[in-house]
Amino acid sequence: MQMPPGVRYKVFKTKKLAIYYLFDDTEIGQIPEKKVVRGGHEFYFFKDAVVIKPIKETSQAQEAPST
C-alpha cells in the first residue's frame, strides 16, 4: 500500500498484515473492504493492510458563562 507524499505515518508489520498509523487527518485514496469507527479512530481494512486514522475533533461546544 502506498501513502500519498507528505503524509506522516508509522508502519507496523506482522507476518500477514501491515498496519499503518496516520498522524494526520488524511484522505484515504483507496476504497476499503471494511471501515470501523472506535475510540476516536477510523480503521480502514484492506486485503493485507489496516490503516488507522485519528478522528479530528470538530466539536462546536461552548463553555457556559461564569456567574
Image: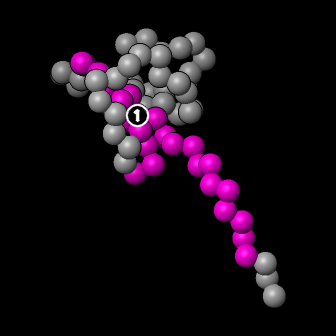
Give the residue furthest to the bottom: 67
Q: Residues within 10 Å of mark 1 (few under 14, many from 20)?
A: many
Describe residue 35's horizontal placement relative to residue 5 as left or right. left
Question: Compared with residue 14, is residue 62 higher up or lower down, i.e. above or below?
Answer: below
Asked if the magenta segment contains residue 46, the reply would be yes
Report the side of 53 relative to 38 (left or right): right
Question: Could you say which is closer to the camera, residue 27 or residue 9?
Answer: 27
Dot 1 corresponds to which residue? 52
On whether residue 41 falls in the magenta region, the answer is: yes
Q: Position of residue 28 (x, y in %)?
A: 47, 22
Would you identify the image quadrant in which residue 64 lies?
A: bottom right
Span shown in magenta: 39-64
Residue 24: percent from left, percent from top: 57, 32
Q: Is residue 25 visible?
A: yes
Residue with the most extreme right position: 67
Q: Give me the residue at 33% from left, 39% from top.
A: 36
In the rendered image, the quadrant that contains the N terminus is top left
At x 79%, y 82%, the residue is: 66
Image quadrant holding the C terminus, namely bottom right
State the image coordinates of residue 63 (x, y, percent, origin top left): 72, 70
Res 18 seen here: no
- The amino acid type of the residue labelled 1 equals Ile
In the image, residue 21 sits, relative to residue 6, either above or below, namely below
Left or right of residue 40, residue 48 in this image: left
Residue 60, image x, y percentages: 67, 56
11 relative position to 29: left or right = left
- Residue 26 quadrant: top right
Q: Residue at x 40, y 34 (%)?
A: 52
Say which residue appears at 40% left-offset and 51% top-offset: 39
Q: On screen, 61 above or below 47?
A: below
The answer to which image quadrant residue 18 occupies is: top left
